[in-house]
Image: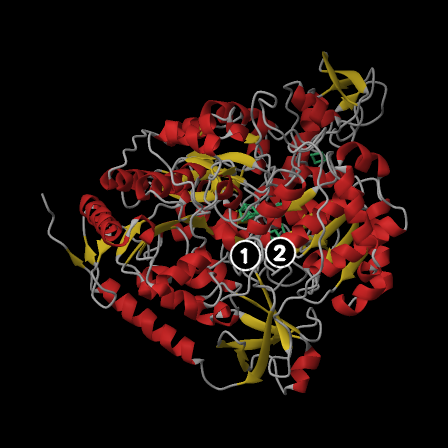
C-alpha cells in the first residue's frame, strides 16, 4: 500500500528531462515517439513504455555510458550505441530487442555477476536490487567465467557511518554514487580510484565518517546494488509499504516516503514527486527519525501541584479536566488577560490554527504568540510593509534561473541543506555568488564557474551594508527605471531615492561601520544590479537584530529598485527556520493578527471571525512572548499553555525566561519530551510527532504540503485532538472529525487559502498560496503583475547602530547559528545518531583572538556578557574574522542563550541573537548557571522517574 503515490513520479526514465521547444520524432521498436530535442533514446523509449535494461543510468544524473547494458541498434549506424548517451533524432529507427542485443547484454551481466557474491537470498537488497532485476531481464542463467578468478569479494566493509554501510564486495563501479554526490548533493566526497578491474569507489581514501561526506544519503539512494545500504534495512529487512509525508525539520519542506514493515518505520526515502526537494534529502530528514520512538517520549499525561513534587500520571480525561479547571479558576480570580498560549511552528497548520482559536475564543483574549517571534517576525513585518505580503516571493526551483545569488545572513548548506544543494548546482552552472555574512560559510567553497564574493561584515551592520549597496545602484544609474515607474509608488520612491543618495549612505562612509572596503561594496552592488536575474536569499542573520525589520525592508527596496521581483530567478526569499514557521504565522499565531495576517483590530474582519466562531472577540492585540515574560514576573500573567515550543532553551536571556516561567501559577506544556520548559510545568500533555498525525505544513516557498499519519499517536491523541478537548472542557465547543475539516474552515476565513482543500492537495501534490479564484492551483511566483497593495512601497531604512557594542569589558562580538546535523534546540536530533557529528556546542574563535588570550583548541572558555555567563570549549577557526566569536545552541547545558541579551527588533521584538558583546577567558569549571542547570535537570529527571499512577476517576 502506498498512500498518495504517483507512479509516474517514481518511474526512473533513465536520463534527465530536457527542456526544448523543438520536438523530434523517432520510431522505437516501430512505435512513433515525439520528444524534446536532446532527449536520450533511453528516455524516449521509457516515455513510450518500452523498457531498455540499464545499470549506470538514472534520471536524476547526467548519462555516463559506462555499463553498456542499454545498447540498442539504430538503423543505418554501425555497432550498438548506448541508448543513454545517444540523443534521439528526427527519423531515427531504433531497435531495443533482438538476439544480438540479448547476447551482448547477457555477456555484460555475466561479467558483472562473476565478480559479485551470489548471496541474493540473504542479501538485504533482495527484492529491491537493480542488478538482480537486470540479471533476470537479460535472461542470465549461467556464468561461464566461474567465481574463483581474481575478484573483489573479500573487500572490507566501511561501517563508520551510523546510518549506512558500504560493502565494496558488491560494487559494480557504475559510479552512480559518485555522480549523485556531485550532481545531486554537490559535496564531491566520493571518487573512482584506479582503472579497469582495479577501479574502486572511495570517500577520498578515508572512511565515510572521516571524509567530506555530509550523510545526505543521495549515494545510497542511487546505488543499484546493496553496496551502499541503509543500516535500518540491513537490520529490519525490506519495507513493505509506504506513506508519503513531509519532513518535520527545516523550512525546505522535503517530501518523503516513510517506508514501513508492519508497523515499524524502516526508512525515510526522499520522494521524487516532492516539488520542494525532487527526491533529495539531508541527514536530518533522511535518517534522523529515531527520536519518534525514543524511550524518552512522554506517553501519558501528567500533573503536579508544585515544581518540586513528583509527576502523577493521569488519564487524558483527568488531565484535560484539571487543566481547564485551573485555567478557569485563574481567569475568574485574575481576569481574562491572566492566561496566554504559545502555538508551535513544528505542529501542523490545522493544529496551530486551533491553538490560536482556543486562545481567542476560549480564553477570550489575544495573548497568542509563536516561535516566529524569535526568528522571522521581521520578515512578516518588513515584507508586508514593502511588497504587501508576508512571505517569500519565489519557488526554490526559481534559483536555477538566477544569474546572481546573494545570500545574506544565512548558511543554506547547514540550515537548509536540500536547498543548499540547489544553490550549489546553479553556482556550478556559472551563476555568481555574493555572501554577506560575518563567517566564511561553506557555500563559498562551492566549485563554481562564476565569481564569488564574500562580504565579511561586522555583526549588527546589515542595514549599513544594504543602504550602501542601494546608494551605489542609484548613484551609478543602475536602477530599473521601467520597473520603478510601472510597479512602485512614485512619491515613496522619490523620498527613498533622496534618502539613499545622501552621502551618509555611501560605501565610503559605511566602510568603517561595516568593516568592508568601499570597493568591495561597490563591486557587489554592480554585480547584483547588472545581472539579468538576481535573487536574494536571507536567513536569521538578517532578522535577529535590533534592526531586523529595517533590514528586511532594505532588501525589498534593493530588489524593487533593480526590478528583481516578479519572475523566475529573482526575488526576496526568506529561508524559514522551522518546518512550519511560515504556516504558524499564516494561521494567526501573532497577537495582533487573525489567521491570514488580518488585523484583529479591524471591525469588519473581526465580525467575520465572530460570526464563524460564534463568539465575540477581543479587539485589542494581546501580549507578545517578551511581554508575557514581563507580565509573569510582574504578577499579572498567571497561566500559560505552551504547545511544542521550548521557551526556556530557545528564547534569549535564559535566566530572565526561567524566572518568568517559575513565577507562573500554572504552566501547561504539550511536547513529545520533557523539554527545558517542561521542567517548570504543572501539566505535561504528551505531544505527537509528525509521523503520528494528519495535517499540512507550509514551507518557505508558501508551499502547503500534506503530512500523513504513518503510525498511531504514541499517547493516543494527535495534538489537534488535545486542543479540541481542552477547548470543549473550557466551555468553547470545537468538533472536528479530521484535520481536513479544520482546513475547510480556514479556507472560509483566510482569503489566500480560499481554494485550498485536502482533495485539491491530493490531486496537485502541493499548493503554493495564495490559492483562490484568481489562482485556483496556487501561485508559485508572486508579484508578477502587481503587488497585493497595488504599488510597491519603498521605505526609508536609516541605519541605527545597536546599543549592544564592544567595550573594554566586552571586547568581542558573539553571533550564533546552526550546524547541519543538529536542529534548533536539539530535542529531536540529540536523540538520534546525529550526535556522532556534533555532541557539544563549541565557541569558534579566530586564531589571533585565541593567541591574544593564550587559548588553545579544546580549552574551556568562560564567555560573559551583560546578560550572564557560560562555559564552552574552544574551537580555533579560520572561518571567523578577528573580533567575532560564534556558537550554536543545540545543547541546553551550553547555555548559549544565558549570554544573549533581551535587546530586540524595534518593530517586532525579535531578539538580537546575532550580536552580543562578550569577553572570553580560560576557566576551569562550569558557570554558576550551568551548575544550577545540572542540579535542576537531575532533580526534574528524578521527579519524572518517580512518577506515580493517579487512581482513575469516574
Ligand atoms: S557503490 Fe553502488 S552506486 Fe557506487 S559504484 Fe558501487 S554499485 Fe555503483
Ligand atoms: S551520503 Fe551524500 S555526501 Fe555522503 S557520499 Fe553519499 S552522496 Fe556524498
Ligand atoms: S532539507 Fe530540511 S526539510 Fe529537507 S530533509 Fe533536510 S531537514 Fe528535512
Ligand atoms: S545505462 Fe547506458 S551505459 Fe549504462
Residue 781 coordinates in the image, percent (x, y): 67, 33
Residue 693 coordinates in the image, percent (x, y): 38, 38
Q: Which residue is mark 1?
A: 910
Residue 818 image-quadrant placement: bottom right
Q: Secondary structure at mark 2?
A: helix
Q: Which residue is mark 2?
A: 548
Seen in the image, is 322 located left or right of residue 389? left
Q: Identify which residue, 912 or 318, lies in the foreground.
A: 912
Q: Compare marks 1 and 2 and give the one earlier in the sequence.
A: 2
Which of the image's four quarters has the N terminus? top left
User: Can residue 198 be spotted in the picture?
Assistant: no
Q: CA distance from mark 1 to mark 2?
A: 8 Å
Disc 1 + disc 2, Cβ < 8 Å: yes
Who's the residue at 63% across and 23% down the image?
51
Residue 199 coordinates in the image, percent (x, y): 70, 52
Mark 2: few, some, or many residues within 10 Å (few <14, many ≥20)? Answer: many
Mark 1: few, some, or many residues within 10 Å (few <14, many ≥20)? Answer: many
Q: Is residue 446 above or below residue 722?
A: below
Amino acid at each position: 500500500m502506498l498512500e498518495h503515490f504517483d507512479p509516474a513520479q517514481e518511474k526512473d526514465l533513465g536520463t534527465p528531462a530536457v527542456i526544448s521547444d523543438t520536438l523530434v520524432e523517432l520510431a522505437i521498436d516501430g512505435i512513433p515517439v515525439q520528444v524534446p530535442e536532446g532527449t536520450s533514446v533511453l528516455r524516449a523509449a521509457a516515455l513510450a513504455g518500452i523498457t531498455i535494461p540499464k545499470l549506470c543510468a538514472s534520471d536524476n544524473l547526467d548519462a555516463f555510458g559506462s555499463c553498456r547494458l542499454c545498447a540498442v541498434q539504430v538503423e543505418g549506424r554501425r555497432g550498438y550505441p548506448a541508448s543513454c548517451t545517444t540523443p534521439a533524432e528526427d527519423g531515427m529507427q531504433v531497435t531495443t530487442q533482438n538476439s544480438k542485443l540479448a547476447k551482448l547484454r547477457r555477456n555484460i551481466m555475466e561479467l558483472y555477476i562473476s565478480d559479485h557474491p551470489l548471496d541474493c537470498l540473504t542479501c538485504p537488497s533482495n527484492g529491491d536490487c537493480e542488478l538482480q532485476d537486470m540479471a533476470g531481464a537479460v535472461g542470465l542463467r549461467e556464468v561461464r567465467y566461474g567465481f574463483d578468478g581474481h575478484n573483489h569479494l573479500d573487500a572490507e566493509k566501511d561501517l563508520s557511518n551510523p546510518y549506512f554501510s558500504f560493502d565494496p564486495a558488491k560494487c559494480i563501479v557504475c559510479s552512480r554514487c559518485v555522480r549523485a554526490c556531485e550532481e545531486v548533493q554537490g559535496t564531491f566526497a566520493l571518487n573512482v580510484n584506479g582503472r579497469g578491474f582495479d577501479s574502486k569507489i572511495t570517500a577520498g581514501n578515508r572512511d565515510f565518517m572521516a571524509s567530506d561526506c555530509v550523510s545526505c544519503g543521495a549515494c545510497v539512494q542511487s546505488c543499484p546494488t546493496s553496496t551502499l545500504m541503509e543500516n535500518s534495512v540491513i537490520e529490519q529487512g525490506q519495507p513493505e509499504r509506504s506513506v508519503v509525508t513531509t519532513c518535520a525539520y527545516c523550512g525546505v519542506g522535503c517530501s518523503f516516503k516513510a517506508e514501513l514493515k508492519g508497523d515499524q518505520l524502516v526508512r525515510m526515502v526522499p520522494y521524487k514527486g516532492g516539488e520542494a526537494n525532487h527526491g533529495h534529502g539531508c541527514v536530518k530528514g533522511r535518517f534522523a527519525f529515531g527520536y519518534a520512538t525514543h524511550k524518552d517520549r512522554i506517553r501519558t499525561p501528567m500533573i503536579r501541584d508544585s515544581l518540586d513534587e513528583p509527576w502523577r500520571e493521569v488519564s487524558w480525561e483527568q488531565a484535560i479536566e484539571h487543566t481547564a479547571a485551573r485555567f478557569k479558576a485563574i481567569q475568574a480570580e485574575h481576569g481574562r488577560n491572566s492566561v496566554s498560549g504559545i502555538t508551535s511552528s513544528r505542529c501542523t497548520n490545522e493544529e496551530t490554527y486551533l491553538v490560536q482559536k482556543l486562545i481567542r475564543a476560549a480564553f477570550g483574549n489575544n495573548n497568542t504568540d509563536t516561535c516566529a517571534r524569535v526568528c522571522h517576525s521581521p520578515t512578516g513585518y518588513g515584507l508586508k510593509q514593502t511588497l504587501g505580503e508576508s512571505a517569500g516571493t519565489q519557488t526554490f526551483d526559481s534559483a536555477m534561473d538566477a544569474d546572481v545569488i546573494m545570500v545574506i545572513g544565512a548558511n543554506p548548506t547547514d540550515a537548509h541543506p536540500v536547498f543548499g544543494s540547489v544553490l550549489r548546482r546553479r553556482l556550478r552552472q556559472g551563476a555568481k555568488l555574493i555572501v554577506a555574512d560575518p563567517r566564511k560559510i561553506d557555500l563559498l567553497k562551492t566549485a563554481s564557474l562564476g565569481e564569488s564574493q564574500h562580504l565579511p561584515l561586522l555583526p549588527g551592520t546589515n542595514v549599513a551594508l544594504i543602504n550602501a549597496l542601494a546608494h551605489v545602484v542609484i548613484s551609478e544609474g543602475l536602477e530599473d527605471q521601467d520597473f520603478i515607474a510601472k510597479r512602485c509608488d512614485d512619491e515613496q520612491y522619490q523620498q527613498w531615492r533622496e534618502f539613499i543618495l545622501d552621502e551618509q549612505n555611501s560605501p565610503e562612509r559605511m566602510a568603517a561601520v561595516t568593516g568592508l572596503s568601499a570597493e568591495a561594496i561597490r563591486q557587489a552592488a554592480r554585480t547584483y544590479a547588472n545581472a539579468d536575474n538576481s535573487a536574494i536569499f536571507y536567513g536569521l542573520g538578517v532578522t535577529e537584530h535590533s534592526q531586523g525589520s529595517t533590514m528586511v525592508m532594505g532588501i525589498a527596496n534593493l530588489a524593487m529598485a533593480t526590478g528583481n521581483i516578479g519572475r523566475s530567478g529573482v526575488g526576496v526569499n526568506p529561508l524559514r527556520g522551522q518546518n512550519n514557521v511560515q504556516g504558524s504565522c499564516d494561521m494567526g499565531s501573532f497577537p495582533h493578527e487573525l489567521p491570514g495576517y488580518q488585523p484583529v483590530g479591524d471591525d469588519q474582519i473581526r465580525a467575520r471571525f465572530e460570526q464563524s466562531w460564534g463568539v465575540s472577540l477581543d479587539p485589542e492585540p494581546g501580549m507578545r512572548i517578551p511581554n508575557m515574560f514581563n507580565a509573569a514576573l510582574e504578577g499579572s500573567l498567571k497561566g500559560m499553555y505552551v504547545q511544542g515550543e521550548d521557551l526556556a532553551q530557545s528564547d534569549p536571556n535564559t535566566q530572565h525566561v526561567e524566572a518568568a516561567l517559575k513565577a507562573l501559577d500554572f504552566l501547561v506544556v504539550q511536547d513529545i519530551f520533557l523539554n527545558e520548559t517542561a521542567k517548570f510545568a504543572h501539566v505535561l500533555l504528551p505531544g505527537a510527532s509528525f509521523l503520528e498525525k494528519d495535517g499540512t505544513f507550509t514551507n518557505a516557498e508558501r508551499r502547503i504540503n500534506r503530512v500523513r499519519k504513518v503510525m498511531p499517536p504514541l499517547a493516543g491523541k494527535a495534538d489537534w485532538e488535545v486542543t479540541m478537548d481542552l477547548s470543549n472542557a473550557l466551555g468553547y465547543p470545537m468538533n472536528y472529525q479530521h484535520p481536513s475539516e479544520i482546513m475547510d474552515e480556514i479556507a472560509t476565513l483566510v482569503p489566500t487559502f480560499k481554494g485550498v482543500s485536502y482533495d485539491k492537495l491530493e490531486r496537485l501534490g502541493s499548493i503554493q498560496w495564495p490559492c483562490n479564484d484568481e489562482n485556483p492551483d496556487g501561485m508559485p511566483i508572486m508579484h508578477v503583475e502587481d503587488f497585493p497593495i497595488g504599488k510597491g512601497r519603498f521605505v526609508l531604512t536609516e541605519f541605527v547602530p545597536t546599543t549592544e557594542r564592544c567595550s573594554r569589558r566586552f571586547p568581542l562580538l558573539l553571533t550564533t547559528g546552526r550546524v547541519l546535523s543538529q536542529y534548533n534546540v536539539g530535542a529531536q536530533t540529540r536523540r538520534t545518531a546525529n550526535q556522532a557529528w556534533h555532541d557539544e556546542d563549541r565557541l569558534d574563535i579566530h586564531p589571533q583572538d585565541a593567541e591574544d588570550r593564550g587559548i588553545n583548541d579544546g580549552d574551556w572558555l568562560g564567555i560573559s556578557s551583560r546578560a550572564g555567563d557560560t562555559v564552552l570549549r574552544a574551537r580555533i577557526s579560520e572561518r571567523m574574522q578577528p573580533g567575532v566569536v560564534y556558537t550554536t545552541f543545540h545543547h541546553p547545558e551550553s547555555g548559549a542563550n544565558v549570554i544573549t541579551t533581551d535587546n530586540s527588533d524595534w518593530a517586532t521584538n525579535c531578539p538580537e541573537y546575532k550580536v552580543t558583546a562578550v569577553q572570553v577567558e580560560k576557566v576551569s569549571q562550569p558557570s554558576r548557571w550551568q551548575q544550577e542547570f545540572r542540579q535542576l535537570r537531575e532533580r526534574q529527571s528524578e521527579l519524572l522517574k518517580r512518577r506515580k499512577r493517579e487512581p482513575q476517576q469516574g
